[in-house]
Image (cartoon, rainbow, N blue to C red):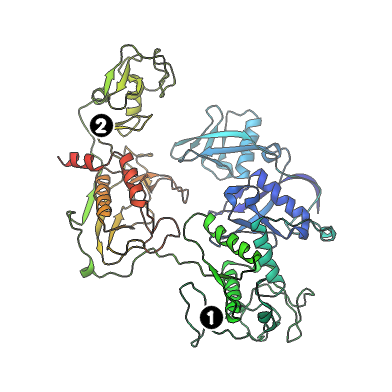
Amino acid sequence: MLLASAVVVWEWLNEHGRWRPYSPAVSHHIEAVVRAGPRAGGSVVLGQVDGRLAPYIIDLQSMNQFRQDTGTLRPVRRNYYDPSSAPGKGVVWEWENDNGSWTPYDMEVSITIQHAYEKQHPWIDLTSIGFSYVIDFNTMGQINRQTQRQRRVRRRLDLIYPMVTGTLPKAQSWPASPGSAASPPAPPCSCPQCILVMSVKAAVVNGSTGPLQPPAARKNMALSGALKLPPPPGPGAKPLDGTGTMRGPVKTIPSQAGRRPASSTLAGATAGSPASPPGANGKTGRVALATLNRTNLQRLAIAQSRVLIASGVPTVPVKNLNGSSPVNPALAGITGILMSAAGLPVCLTRPPKLVLHPPPVSKSEIKSIPGVSNTSRKTTKKQAKKGKTPEEVLKKYLQKVRHPPDEDCTICMERLTAPSGYKGPQPTVKPDLVGKLSRCGHIYHIYCLVAMYNNGNKDGSLQCPTCKTIYGVKTGTQPPGKMEYHLIPHSLPGHPDCKTIRIIYSIPPGIQGPEHPNPGKSFSARGFPRHCYLPDSEKGRKVLKLLLVAWDRRLIFAIGTSSTTGESDTVIWNEVHHKTEFGSNLTGHGYPDANYLDNVLSELAAQGISEDSAAQEKD
């Protein structure tokens, strides 16, 4: 045991092996449950303090974070830091990601930055703690030592993390103190998530298949040494019906403590526990909440449903609702709670499976798409445009304003009646000239527009920074690759009356060009070839034709930082959504989706691609 004072930061382990801190408010919430001991139930519902964490529950016995809609388990830990460090002062250091939102640094990094900041150092090199970055406090920027890429950083104040004083355990454990179990029980939380968690936990600890069993079913249940799970269906079992529930008679499962495989029971059952009912063999067993992984939770729900069905009690199936939002599975759980309160039995069903690809298709079944020429298209490296200067390009889109209004230029934020406040490389135009864009009518310093053009793709197009109106033909920085498209003889969910257009994008890794974020550096291309799907309807073919225009203009992909993996210098999607799930919609990138085709047409229009612009380009 250690005698000290410290701040407690609760952290979770991400897929890259980094411990990420929960916010101070969430850490306070977890710590309050820990200090309450077993009377609080041993489970922490994070959605009670942060709505964005609604799908997550922490099991303090196993020290795991459980995501209810996906079944993902991640380790958590209770870590201690010096009260004089950043978490003890409520200081949070964050960096700006590619989406413009702010991401907190790991706690170790944040403490190191804050220490240098308090010492009034002009900068801090993070190489010593394993990161190839320099933080410049003068510019409040993060500089990549290898690529010289810069990001903004910020320092903000938040709640101080919870403080502990006195005896600290060397190892993280639960309950927090031996005497906590003797404390008077706290009033139970009545929120739907807690009710659901506690009802499942009570069912497991009591050795039953659930709180909804009718009396007739309970009489037929054998008391074994541990909670038994239904075995896989044998040759004589009835098949699953449309809801994924086993139909047919269910026999009592006899005790098989002497020869059961480890996978047939919930792992972690402890012999000799006084809280467990005696079994037929004289031994006792107990199941901990730590054993409730995703598979066992599903089996427990199915076992409960089978007993209800076998007893002849009418059941109402509550399906795992389709969709990527964490709200949908929560609605199913809350529906079950309300039905149980009304005395209605609930029959849980198995969740749908992810179907990314169609059934195998032979070459003879693959057909070209009527009205669309060829079956593939390639892009090459960008060809530099020669001749016109930025001033000559912008002259086509601007009208000079001799008497500018007394308003701000929204690029440099200086008054239009004063010279431009741009301080970068000097354009050749005078800083006090003002121009109005011909179509949308927004007014800017011409000096600022030239600077904005020079910092862009320099492709002869201009996009109004206020209303996003595009002048000219906008092109992107998509690396070289190939786009294939054809018909396959299968239908998408929600489109039973037509075949499917399959698009296959192939982009190899390579070296970044002058138009990319880090010229001369290699880039990766993960997940290629990427398969995407459209219905072979009139609107589906319209979308395909516009996607071909977007491909030719190099607007489908870009090189940047992946929002999924955090990897930089990799090929990413470029603001035009595609459907990559063929037969399901579990990730939100599949069908049915009644609004998808209209949404993608709007996204293409925002890139300057419509039927009119496509026709003009052909002419």
Q: Which quarter of the rendered picture does the N terminus lie within? A: bottom right
If you read the primary sequence from the N terminus, does the residue marked by circle 2 or circle 1 appear first? Answer: 1
Disc 1 is placed on an element classified as loop
User: Is 341 rendered above or below residue 463?
Assistant: below
Q: For marks 2 and 1, give the CA distance.
A: 65 Å
Q: Which quarter of the rendered picture does the C terminus lie within? A: top left
Q: Is residue 62 visible?
A: no
Quadrant in the rendering for residue 295 = bottom right
Disc 2 is placed on an element classified as loop
Amino acid marked by disc 2: Gly
Q: Is residue 169 left or right of residue 105?
A: right
Residue 426: image location, x then y, percent: 35, 19
Residue 19: image location, x then y, percent: 60, 51
Q: Is residue 502 left or right of residue 112?
A: left
Q: Which mark is residue 232?
A: 1
Amino acid marked by disc 1: Pro
Residue 69: image location, x then y, percent: 54, 60
Circle 2 packing at 10 Å, graded few (<14), some (14-19), many (20+), is some
**Residue most toward the left?**
619
User: Is 122 rendered above or below residue 265?
Assistant: above
- Residue visible at 44% across and 21% down in the picture: 413
- Residue visible at 27% across and 22% down in the picture: 398
Residue 271: image location, x then y, percent: 74, 77
Q: Which mark is residue 518?
A: none
Q: Which mark is residue 460?
A: 2
Q: Nearer the viewer, residue 222 or 385?
A: 222
Q: Nearer the viewer, residue 62 or 522?
A: 62
Quadrant in the rendering for residue 502 = bottom left
Q: Is residue 65 left or right of residue 503?
A: right
- Residue visible at 22% across and 55% down in the picture: 376
Q: Nearer the viewer, residue 488 or 99?
A: 488
